[in-house]
Amino acid sequence: MAQEIKLLATDMDGTFLDENGQFDRTRLTTLLPKLAQENIIFAVASGRPLLALEELFKEYLEQIALVAENGSVVTYQGEILFEAKMTTKQYLDLVDVIKNSPYAKGTDLLLSGKDGAYMLEETSPSYRAFMAQYYENIQLVSSFSEVTDDIFKVTTNISPEEMEAGVAWLNQAVPYATAVTTGFESVDIILKDVHKGVGLEHLCQGLGIGLENVVAFGDNLNDLEMMGMAGYAVAPENAREAIKKIADIEIGHAHTGAVLSYMEGLVDDVY
């Protein structure tokens, strides 16, 4: 690794988290002071909303950076460094497009905002239960026009068999937004030209760190830009082939804690 490391940016689901959506808190608690000693910042880069990441890492918020909503919100030690919000017209139009998509699953969609997440009252119980694993403060509304929160992202589901075609259809149908698959059946639709790479860039600018000094970890297609921009890219064994192709190194499976092990190796002078 030729460049000095100053920031570690890791995706969550399928990368840093285990099969239960958790991580080893004892190991991270031990790791963070070691990173600080080496002037290395730990950053979470996820499609998950800011509220969910703040809950997941609540005991570490004064030590880490968060790149949430696939790059739409960036914070460091609780301070917002970047936001990319949709206008009300944009997200309401987007909802109509999704509902009329040949790949849509009825009303299985969600608005992700600063203060919470929003679903229609008629949303299926199964979708509500699924999304409750990833979103905090989910509120049911009779119409999305009732929502007054700042909205960063619209999320929906497309079957795995139709995922590629469905994402392509959405990207053609909505010129101001980009649809990306985040794993499982979920598709995130965010403002065009916003992605984890943009979030990472704003974080680095805010911290005075060069992208060449970043090690990025990811497994899915919404990690492509971030990993391509980082000085060094690391993919777990379970990553998509497209991610493995751009990675500098492949490590063990995410569910074995391989990313934490790799990070621990960095501060123990293994690299």
Image (spheres, grey):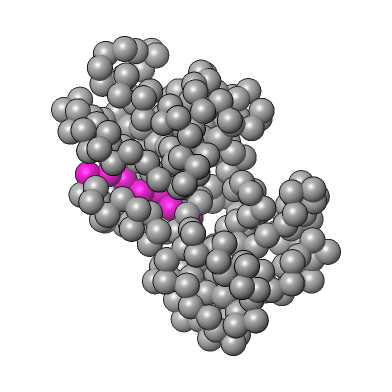
Q: Is residue 185 magenta?
A: no
With 213 as the anchor, is 160 left or right in this view?
right
Q: Quadrant of the N terminus?
A: top left
On screen, residue 19 versus residue 50, left or right, reads: right
Residue 91 visible: no
Q: Residue 55: x percent and y percent?
A: 33, 58
Point 46% across, 81% down: residue = 148
Which image quadrant for residue 116?
bottom left
Q: Residue furthest right?
A: 102
Residue 181 image offset from top left, x and y in percent: 64, 48
Q: Give x and y (percent) for residue 78.
A: 26, 56
Q: Nearer the viewer, residue 67 or 229?
A: 67
Quadrant position of the C terminus in the picture = top left
User: Is the residue 115 above or below the residue 45 in the image?
Assistant: below
Q: Range of the magenta residues?
A: 63-69
Question: Residue 229 vs residue 156: left or right?
Answer: left
Horizontal side of 90 relative to 53 (left or right) equals: right
For the point 51% across and 28% down, which residue is it? 253
Queried whether the magenta region covers residue 68, the answer comes back as yes
